[in-house]
């Protein structure tokens, strides 16, 4: 007689195969961004559409629903383990969402995303928004249709934000963002009055930038057996298997620190993924082994980028190495200031901590307007530019510098941007908790050993997986609800020191 | 009323989806060799196994058999187009083969290939064959089981060689190889008596080698919109879509021309793929749009590597560029001689035209012995070394230099190696036909314009696809059956000139 497999194990096997398919999709995405020649886009779109269709079929099939129902039944009649219960809750929610979607819509979305990405690349390289506008309109229409099919008790934008920020409400978001809307422009104005170096007037050769990035990750303990680095137009981090972590960076002409800081940032994402409780193949397939929200993800990348790499003691450790690489630096503080221009710019990815939030507020307002308030696609460039003038005092010279700069909308990702700013808030609040527990990040950086920082995150943050959502995680780790106050306090004190520290290059 | 789709179109749609899945598999293979960290291998194996299982199911399903039978019925009752007939012949043959295989065997093979590749990498890097031997034994056992299940009227080795060299018989192979077995050792002996430079006593920086390879392909008209380059442990060419052609190369320390020549070689493969009648998505899925055999494939790569890049006029065009890159060259003939050491070595991929065939004769004999003549896996290293001593007068210092040097067996590819040597024969015979039609390759290289060479291949060779097999193609293009004579004549005359040309560096 065959041994009877438990419903739980049968469900696990099913989820595992779904995960394998999903990771194939991710591998195609990685390749698309790091190695694929541009004309490969059409066929890649076909491949991704096929996989998306297969995945949707698996994730909404009757067989899957039955497996899930049996597992739930077993759970009810068993010891009602809370972890397994949470896994089932999350899977049931996702199944409801998958089943609500018409397979034709899923296929159309996959095609539209590949097409959108390809059009966006062309539009950006020729700085011509009109090449991308029709593809964006199609993506918006399809997303609105998706929201109608999902029929959740949330607004359109809220529904689309769910995959990135589970349980987030617009009202709560606006409550968290309100102090930032008030205070950030004041801080920017304050920063602009201080004497400071203009944006970098030097550059580093590509090869040197690449070597510096590799050295950084070596010093942070990167294991090349489980991770690899590449270049892509937009830096990202992606996990392709339980022991296969990838990140990319890019070299931006005239911005000698961009690649280095992007490397730090993406590696922070990867460290979170590496620390999730998903290291065995079995666990990798279950929701609790996954990242809980993009904001938490972002808090981890921002921690390594901002609290470590942009800190004053980090500049003290690294400035001579940068000088060897060709940077005309005269002091540690010179590097520190170059890492922290604290001045408005047009580019989100290159933005510093002070101005970053403004980029997000603009994008968040615009995508809510596009999805819920009748802003037309044609108006997007002018609305974008108007808000940049108002909030940052700058006007993009063209749409490549403006509303075409980010990849997200080209793939139909709406509701994603706020996670970046929430990540700043979470990073700051977690750093306060870390400081009172083991000492501040800056102290550890100054000591030359950042391992305790990673250890603390590995003990307190990473293992939570999806057992708590973002706000639950913050409450658990810091003992307080999420707030914008720690982030604003951190910014204010950093601004104070930067404004008063001596620099040989002030103008 | 829905329009009734013809059996032909339904079959085409089915084949197209199969092709998409196959190209996803190829993308995973590309990534595995160019970007994946080593610990990613286990999960990659899972991904490849899943796809292999899906592909096998599609290629052996009743639905597919029915579609194929309907298309054949339509063909019988229609105009019996010979091209469509040939497409159906090839598909039916492949279906019979797929249906003959147990799905469990297909899954086991996919897993064993991934495992074999991973073990081979470890074994090679520690030069320890024993780490690889168990995986190789499993692959041999599975391949023998595959042959039993296929039950074709061919020997074990012949059956396994079919995917690479359709219709090839061992007796015909031995007939073609017999003159080479006699004559090549004599020519090597003759070459060894001439005064010649020792193997390269100089090297080039990696970055320079990379730039030289990129320049070579620019001069040969590479379109970066449809092709990309990367590094991998073993150079290869792969097509991932109708407009997505990839090649890799590698930099070998102390072998300053290795990467350059590998680039030329792999690009020759890619040019053949780019010239196949598969440029529309629809055609890409049909057999006639595909490469007809690995020997023909190899003839195209060898043409660009040997007839173009290793020719004397090529050295005249390029030697000063190599000198700029740091090569201590004193004349064009100095570069030419370095490109053509015509001296025995241990490495197949680095071998020149004269000795290459000996590497293949050894591998062919050994894999026939492993599969059909009871040679044990344990005996492989010593048998390998014995034959290298006898035929090339050299003994590998370790198994990494010996029987672990090639990737093929690690992935269970047996019957593949002879195609390389057949490729030399085909390249030489095609070059004779080309010479009498438009002038010799060397004349065109000397004129600085190689476009006519590509045009000739694009008109006469590439469009044949699988409408003819390798021997049929040679007969069609050259008007004669395939023979080893043109290759031996070419070698003899090259050897004559190389032996008599003056060189400032003879020792």
Image: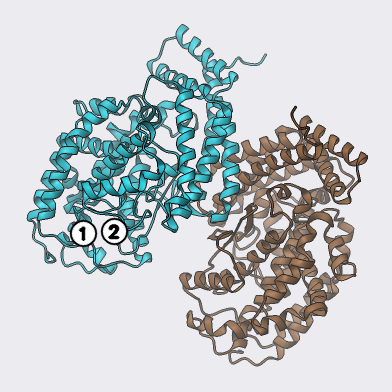
Chain colours: A cyan, B brown
Labels 2 and 1 touching (C-beta < 8 A): yes
Quadrant in the rendering for residue A200: bottom left
- The answer to whether marks 2 and 1 sit on the same chain is yes
Local crowd size for mark 2, using a 10 Å CA cut-off: few (<14), some (14–19), many (≥20): many
Question: Between marks 2 and 1, how big is the CA–CA gap?
Answer: 8 Å
In screen coordinates, is B129 left or right of A181?
right
Image point (55%, 58%), residue name = B232
Q: Chain of mark 1?
A: A
**Residue B296 visible somewhere in the drawing:** yes
For disc 1, the marked residue is A338
In screen coordinates, is A466 left or right of A332?
right
Q: Chain of mark 2?
A: A
For disc 2, the marked residue is A257
The percent position of residue B406, horizontal first and vertical second, equals: 64, 58
Looking at the image, tell me whether mark 2 or mark 1 is earlier in sequence order: 2
Image point (15%, 38%), residue name = A182
Q: Image quadrant for the C terminus of chain A? A: bottom left
Q: Image quadrant for the N terminus of chain A? A: top right
Question: Toward the viewer: B37 or A353?
Answer: A353
Quadrant in the rendering for residue B402: bottom right
The percent position of residue B126, horizontal first and vertical second, equals: 53, 55
What is the number of the mark on residue B142?
A: none
- Callout 1 secondary element: helix
């Amino acid at each position: 007689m065959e041994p009877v497999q438990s419903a739980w194990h049968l469900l696990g096997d099913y989820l595992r195969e779904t995960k394998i398919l999903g990771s194939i999709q991710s591998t195609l995405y990685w390749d698309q961004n790091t190695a694929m020649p541009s004309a490969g886009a059409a066929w890649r779109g076909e491949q991704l559409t096929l996989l998306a269709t297969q995945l949707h079929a698996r994730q909404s099939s009757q067989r899957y629903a039955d497996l899930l129902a049996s597992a739930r039944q077993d759970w009810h009649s068993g010891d009602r383990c809370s972890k397994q219960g949470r896994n089932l809750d999350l899977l049931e929610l996702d199944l409801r969402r998958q089943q609500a979607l018409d397979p034709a819509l899923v296929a159309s979305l996959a095609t539209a995303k590949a097409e959108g990405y390809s059009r966006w690349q062309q539009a950006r390289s020729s700085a011509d928004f009109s090449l991308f506008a029709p593809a964006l309109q199609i993506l918006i229409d399809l997303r609105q249709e998706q929201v109608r099919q999902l029929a959740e008790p949330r607004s359109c934008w809220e529904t689309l934000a769910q995959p990135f920020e589970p349980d987030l409400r617009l009202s709560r978001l606006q409550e968290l963002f309100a102090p930032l809307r008030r205070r950030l422009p004041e801080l920017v104005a304050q920063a602009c009055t201080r004497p400071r170096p203009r944006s970098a007037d030097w550059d580093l050769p590509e090869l040197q930038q690449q070597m510096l990035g590799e050295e950084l990750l070596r010093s942070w303990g990167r294991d090349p057996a489980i991770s690899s680095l590449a270049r892509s137009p937009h830096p990202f981090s992606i996990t392709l298997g339980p022991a296969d972590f990838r990140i990319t960076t890019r070299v931006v002409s005239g911005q000698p620190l961009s690649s280095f800081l992007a490397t730090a940032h993406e590696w922070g994402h990867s460290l979170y993924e590496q620390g999730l409780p998903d290291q065995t193949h079995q666990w990798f397939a279950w929701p609790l082994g996954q990242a809980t929200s993009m904001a938490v993800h972002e808090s981890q990348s921002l921690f390594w980028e901002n609290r470590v790499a942009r800190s004053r003691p980090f500049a003290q450790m690294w400035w001579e190495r940068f000088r060897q690489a060709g940077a005309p630096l005269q002091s540690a503080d010179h590097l520190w200031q170059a890492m922290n221009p604290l001045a408005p710019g047009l580019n989100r990815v290159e933005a510093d901590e002070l101005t970053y939030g403004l980029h997000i507020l603009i994008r968040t307002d615009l995508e809510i307007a596009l999805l819920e308030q009748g802003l037309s696609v044609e108006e997007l460039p002018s609305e974008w530019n108007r808000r940049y003038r108002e909030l940052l005092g700058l006007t993009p010279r063209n749409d490549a510098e403006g509303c075409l700069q980010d990849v997200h909308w080209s793939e139909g990702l709406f509701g994603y941007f706020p996670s970046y700013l929430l990540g700043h808030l979470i990073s700051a609040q977690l750093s306060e908790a870390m400081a009172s527990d083991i000492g501040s990040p800056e102290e550890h950086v100054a000591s030359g050993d950042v391992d305790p920082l990673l250890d603390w995150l590995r003990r307190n943050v990473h293992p939570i997986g999806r057992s708590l959502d973002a706000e639950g995680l913050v409450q658990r780790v810091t003992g307080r609800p999420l707030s914008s106050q720690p982030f604003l306090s951190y910014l204010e004190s950093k601004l104070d020191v930067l404004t008063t520290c001596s620099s040989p290059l002030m103008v």
